[in-house]
Amino acid sequence: MTSTLPENAKLVNRYLDAKLDGRPSELYLASAHLIVHGGKRLRPYLVIKSCQMLGGTARQAMPAAAAIEMIHNFTLVHDDIMDNDEMRHGVPTVHTKFGIPLAILAGDVLFSKAFATVSTDNVPDIKTSAKLVSRLARACVDVCEGQVLDIGMAEGKKIPRRADYITMIEKKTSALFEVSCAMGAICAKAKDSDVTNLASFGKNLGVAFQITDDYIGVLGDPSVTKKPVGNDLREGKKSLPILLAIQKSDRNTKRKILSAFGNQTATKKEIGEAIQAMHSLKIEKEVRSLALQYAQKAKRALDVYSGGAKSELLSLLDFVVKRSL
């Protein structure tokens, strides 16, 4: 992972601390709860580095960088409520610690503060502020649409097609990576063609990120993921590795996978057999190959640029696709 990621995270955290301070104190404690307990700040990093690559500065990018992290955490707070998850980043989720009503309001505060942060109060150039607000609003709509698609897949009886899965993650996950890079370009007052190129980089990086993340969620090492082995399998998450495994398996292998899929009471033996069955199908190779295809698309979007910030963006791309399982 690129060494400047922690350095940028410190700058973003300092800015967020100032923005998420207010009364009633419990509302702001709830809003900042997940932020203070972890996160690599990948999306703010993309904002800052995209801006720097196009001649801007970290200072110019900071309001947008903080705004995207607020939106990201807003989605986490509300996702955890919808999924009834009790833990995230190794700490209780916001609704578990503060209760559902306050958690909903904490998410709403994060959402509202994000738009305030890219308003003309913090971005003196009105034209730049308007562009940032417009792109961020569009991304938020995409995330909501993607969440509904994800819910539909989870509740439906059919295993989704690969194209449906890709459409869902392009909206639910990739939209925030895409808008991060686009907003970085906008902060640098770049040409429309540059904004388009950076948006393409972010979108394809986001898809590669989620494909890899879904593989880790099913077949990753629990000592790395900090989640129980086969967690996504037990929860019945219809992610790419699982749908590929079900599509590729014979009757006996499929039976082993489906006996654990979505089965909260699956035994350790059943989970182990399902995971072994998935490994036997060599799912990792296919998933990695698809993630690399999107990584190559992301890389091509930056072909016309040069410099240190570009190298740092490509290092992040490499880390996202090849991170440890």
Image (tube, rainbow, N blue to C red):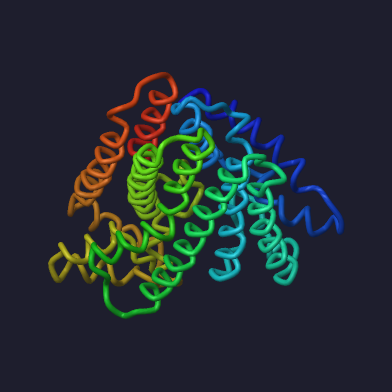
Which residue occupies the foreground of this view, 55 or 252?
55
Look at the image and tell me in which quarter the N terminus lies.
top left
Which residue occupies the foreground of this view, 155 or 309?
309
Label total for image: 0
Residue at 38% over, 65% down: 237
Residue at 22% over, 43% down: 293
Answer left or right for 78 relative to 14: left
Residue 301 placement: quadrant: top left
Residue at the left extreme of this rendering: 250
Seen in the picture, residue 167 relative to 288 is either above or below; the reply is below
| Residue 212 image point, x, y percent | 34, 47
Answer left or right for 321 relative to 111: left
Which residue occupies the foreground of this view, 205 or 187?
187
Residue at 61% over, 58% down: 74
Seen in the picture, residue 150 relative to 215 is either above or below; the reply is below
Residue 124 placement: quadrant: top right
| Residue 168 image point, x, y percent | 36, 63
Look at the image and tell me in which quarter the C terminus lies.
top left
